[in-house]
Amino acid sequence: MSIDAPAGGQPSPIGDAALAGIDRVSAIEAVRLRIGTAIQLGLLRPGERLPDKDQVALGLSVSPITARRALTSLAEDGVVVRRRGRGGGTFVADRPPTDVLATLAPAQADFGHVHRLVDRRLLGECAVAHFAALNATATQIAELRRLVAEMAAAGSWSAYHQADERFHRLVAGASGLGAEVDAYLEALGDLYDYFIPYPIDRLHESNKDHLRLVEALAGNDVRGAVQIAHDHVDILHRTMFMGLSGPGGSLG
């Protein structure tokens, strides 16, 4: 969410401090939107405890200070509540204000953009799965299995998402495609910018695809690996932003 420098490399008439302030506000609003969208879709339920700010930051790929400010802002708006003491933390409010949630819906332009990103990832995912089935080493297969186990044991969407990203990046690395994999990693990173919190039981179900993919890679099953990768990503078309003027809710 940065602002491009003027053409020709000339200094912006807006000071660096001002630009940094805009970037911080944009990042905070992005976190507010992603959490608010998950609440609207029922993916985060009333009374549900959110991970701590550091885990929210890792799960949404933002800085801890951005996560803290976003959560503070949502608390001020009554979307979440903070409780102190034993068993305390940040929780989804029992009745989040509908007028506030209405301001936290993705823009219409986001739908087309997200689905174009899914298409780009789909192409890359099939390519890296194909070549990973040919080139993955025993060490890489073992680490992929470890990451599948880590996701299976994850107790929150944040912990799951962190392992999920490492998993897909490792599959890409195992493909041996070198610089050719950069376009895939760019699409993956751009799509993760739209990741929203999701119920952990749904994510554990999605993790079964990861297990099947690892077994296909271990068996040098090129056709099976490509089909699993295709189906795993294709579901995003039906789940991203579920129920909001189009398909909805993201997996990994």
Image: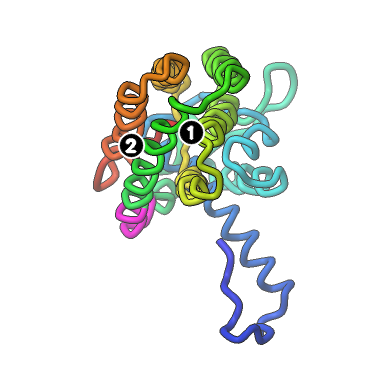
Pointer 1 or 2: first along the chain:
1
Taking the spot 39% from the left edge, 31% from the top edge, the residue there is 130
* Visible residue check, residue 70: yes
Q: Main secondary structure of the magenta part?
A: helix
Q: Secondary structure at mark 1?
A: loop
Label 1 and label 2: CA atoms lie apart by 14 Å
Question: For mark 1, what is the residue?
Answer: 197
Q: Residue furthest front?
A: 134
Rendered image quadrant of residue 246 = top left
Q: Residues within 10 Å of mark 2 (few under 14, many from 20)?
A: many
Q: Which residues are magenta?
A: 106-113
Taking the spot 57% from the left edge, 44% from the top edge, the residue there is 74
Residue closer to the observer: 216 or 54: 216
Question: For mark 2, what is the residue?
Answer: 236
Quarter of the picture holding the N terminus = bottom right
Rendered image quadrant of residue 8 = bottom right
Q: Secondary structure at mark 2?
A: helix
Left or right, residue 58 beside residue 30: right
Q: Residues within 10 Å of mark 1 (few under 14, many from 20)?
A: many
Give the percent coordinates (x, y) of residue 248.
Answer: 31, 38
Q: Check disc 2 and give the amino acid type.
A: Leu
